[in-house]
Amino acid sequence: MKRLLSLCLALATLCAPYAAHAAAESMSERELKRILQRERTIIAAAQSAGEAMDRGNTEMQLREVVQEYESLLRRDPQFIAGFIAYGLFLNNAGEAKRAYAIFKKAEKIEPELAVIKNQLGNHHAEEGEYEKALTYYQGSVALEPKEALYHYQLGTLLYEFREFFIDAKLFTRDALLTRCGEAFARAAELAPDNIAYTYRHAESFYDLPTPDWPGALAAWKAIEQRTKAGVEQETILLQEANVLIQLGQPDTARAVLERVTAEPLQTNKKKLVDQLGVTPDKAP
């Protein structure tokens, strides 16, 4: 239920392009908008109530939302936006098998929609069916090459389960690591303000068959320019210092470490200082 509460609000945004694709709304489109609006109302009330939320009542209302989706799709069994919204709703409620069945039905209606392929890929990845997940993720990227999320998920799948893909002889190690780097680079390029994407892109330079330290340094510096002063930015400075050490630039690394003053980062800072051969009492 907690996952459902936190993610229902996102459904309206995700489904909006599919719910209002025509100039004149159909009855199904109007009904879907009403359901999504009801979700927003339920979640807003729950968030406003906080600890005083009536969980039983909230769960009852969300079950009613499920019934409304079922009714909508019975009336209009070809309504793709309804299937997408309902599948996302079920998936984020922890109903993975039911969600998968809904997305498979959606795939039969619209086999070339990236959002559907992405959701099916997610399911197969979670089930340990990595080759099937790869096929779906690659399909999402091909259909919507300007969607950063799809590139990021492809890179993550390949890297996290690299031994599977290598053992299955689907990739050589060098080819897989290079492909991961390309995927993360594209995600960061498409969404430069997304710290998760840009951070992983910078890390990916370490993963290459031959680490690209200059590339990594440039990536970390670019992230530094986009982060706020404080712990977040100083975390990036630690990464820069590490790369500078790898590049054989200890003096520059020391200068960067002098800028790291946040208490939570001192343990990691000391590790880098130790690599520079500086005693603790002389540490920057």
Image (spheres, grey):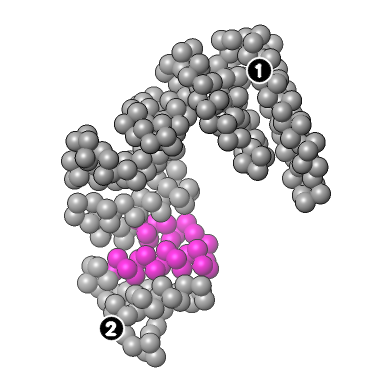
Q: On the rendered image, what quadrant is the N terminus found in?
A: top right
Camera sees residue 118: no
Asked whether the residues under the numbered discs 2 and 1 touch, taking CB atoms below 8 Å apart as contact, a structural biologist would say no
Q: Name the residue under label 2.
A: 277
Q: Whole-Å distance between the Cαs marked 2 and 1?
A: 66 Å
Magenta span contains residue 227: yes
Where is residue 31? Give x, y as percent: 70, 17
Residue at 28% over, 69% down: 244
Magenta span contains residue 183: no
Which numbered disc flags the more N-terminal residue, 2 or 1? 1
Instruction: Classify 192 as above or below 112.
Output: below
Specify whether 207 is left or right of 108.
left
User: Could you tell me how many numbered marks the image carries?
Assistant: 2
Label 2 packing within 10 angstroms: few (<14), some (14-19), many (20+): few
Q: Which residues, given as a range, are shown in magenta?
A: 219-244
Where is residue 168? Give x, y as percent: 22, 35
Res. 71 image quadrant: top right
Q: Mark 1 points at which residue?
A: 70
Where is residue 150? Give x, y as percent: 41, 35
Specify whether 67 is left or right of 19.
right
Residue at 34% over, 55% down: 203
